[in-house]
Image: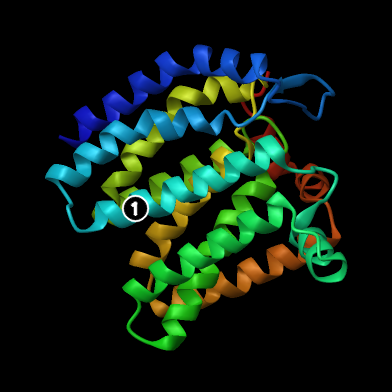
Amino acid sequence: MMLILSLLAFMLTKILIPPLAQLLASGGALRKNFQDREIPVAMGLVIGFGVLPSILIYGSFLNKIFAPQLLILLFTTLLVGLIDDLLGNHDVKGLKGHFSLLFKKKRLTSGALKAIIISLISLYFSFLVSDSYFVWILNYFILVFITNLFNLLDVRPGRTIKVYFLLGLILVLAYPFNNYLLIILSSVLAYSSWDLKGKGMLGDTGSNFLGMSIGISLVLNLSLTIKFILFLALIYLHWYTERNSLTKLIERVYFLRLIDNLGRR
């Protein structure tokens, strides 16, 4: 059954890529990439649309309890990411920049709105799956930090999808409960060549969607000790990226640079 649902997600994503890219371009949803070329942004929509029928079927037949929560988390995240892609002021960078404007100048950016909404739904989901206040807060921070981390990765072609493949495959192999990730992995595979060629950007729409799907798996499956270690690592990563360029770090480390450039055209 999961093989059929994954194949459906793959095929639907492949079919939707060209018309969605054309729709975004004709509507002016374009952004300059690192090569200063204008390409369609919010291409993560194609992954959302590509997996939706399969996840609905998955929920109807395989996991009726978990699927509604999964749908709410993933597609609320996708929607607020889309709003930020289409309406956001992208001169403002990082969580610090968005919340500085909010608290100092009383100006709500789409980036701050996105962060607030993702925080609220993450807080609610974490409450549902936690057995203590400590675990609740720990799960909450893992969800929001992982979701934002994928957003930080989406500045070079293929970077986000490579990290997603790595983490997604590890989680699927380690925890059979994560079979829903197979559906999303199939859609990402279908989209990957488009991303690697630099023909479109996932945008916040796609990167936050993918980050949330990984975050859900992590909070549902990791032990408390591993969660706490991950929490500390995520705090450090966010502290580092607020002060330094993640891309420059990757370029300095040969192994990371090799993987980052792999398949890029």
Residue annotated with mark 1: 70
Assess disc 1: are there few (<14), some (14-19) or many (≥20) residues with their C-alpha within 10 Å of its C-alpha: some
Q: Secondary structure at mark 1?
A: helix
- Which of the 4 image quadrants contains residue 39? top right
Q: Position of residue 165 (x, y in %)?
A: 47, 40
Q: Specify whether 236 is left or right of 160.
A: right
Q: Position of residue 43 (x, y in %)?
A: 57, 28
Pick the front one: 252 or 122: 122
Q: Is residue 228 above or below residue 257?
A: below
Which quadrant of the rendered structure holds the C terminus? Answer: top right
Q: Is residue 260 above or below residue 237?
A: above
Q: Is residue 160 above or below residue 30?
A: below
Residue drawn at x 87%, y 70% as measured from the top left:
104
In this view, which residue lies farthest toward the left? 61
What is the three-letter code of the residue carrying label 1? Leu
Q: Specify whether 57 is left or right of 78.
A: left
Residue drawn at x 43%, y 35% as measured from the top left:
48
Residue drawn at x 55%, y 44% as measured from the top left:
163
